[in-house]
Amino acid sequence: MACRPCAALAVTLLFLCAEAEGFTLCHAPTLQTKVFKYRIWDMDQKSLYLLNDQLVAGHLQGANAALEEKVFWVPNRSFAQARLPVILGIQNGTRCLASRAAPQPTLRLEDADITALPGAGEASAPFTFFRSYKDGLWRFESAANPGWFLCTSARAHEPLGLSRGPDATHVLDFYFQLC
């Protein structure tokens, strides 16, 4: 019985000594990033698909429905979780939507690993969008360009872009459904 306190003290001293010398006895598990696969379409029922290396929105029917791109997303823990930050990509998360900070920001597809971006901290801002939800519809605000939202054109088969607000030419509201 007298050895139990000695053993506990020895283990405690071992941990304290290792910590003081900068050693770790075991590594904490790395943060795993789960990738979600969703279908996204705008409130005018336009689906997303690739055309000439651009992500566009249009009405896809019949055999063309197979062209629809699924959107892959991961949460980005580098930003306030209350804002629901996500990184959006297509093609299994190998090409991500990005918007670099600019007075007139544009939206591009960039080759990137969607699972590596959340670990990039502030450098992931161009790839990050804050989700907001109202009345069954989602909006995606650019983290790098506050006040600019992911949008489709009111016309079919036009590229996705960014807009400051909804108007006669831009649709900012999307349906977002788990695949």
Image (cartoon, rainbow, N blue to C red):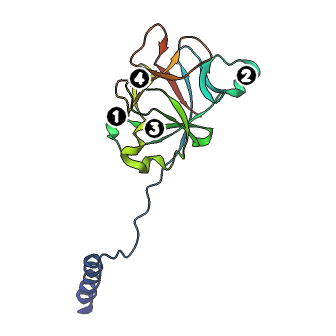
Q: Are marks 1 and 4 in contact (CB under 8 Å)?
A: no
Q: For the residue marked with disc 3, what is the amino acid?
A: Phe
Mark 1 or 2, nearer chain start: 2
Does residue 33 appear to the left or right of 84 in the view shown? right
Mark 3 or 4, nearer chain start: 4
What residue is pinned by disc 4?
Answer: 104
Residue 60 coordinates in the image, percent (x, y): 68, 19
Does residue 92 appear to the left or right of 74 in the view shown? right
Image disc number at residue 83: 1
Q: Secondary structure at mark 1?
A: helix
Q: Residues within 10 Å of mark 3 (few under 14, many from 20)?
A: many
Mark 2 or 3, nearer chain start: 2
Q: Secondary structure at mark 2?
A: helix
Cα gap from disc 1 to disc 3, whole angstroms? 15 Å
What residue is pinned by disc 3?
Answer: 127
Cα gap from disc 2 to disc 4, whole angstroms? 33 Å
Mark 1 or 3, nearer chain start: 1
Q: Residues within 10 Å of mark 4 (few under 14, many from 20)?
A: few
Q: Residues within 10 Å of mark 1 (few under 14, many from 20)?
A: few
Residue 62 coordinates in the image, percent (x, y): 75, 19
Image disc number at residue 64: 2
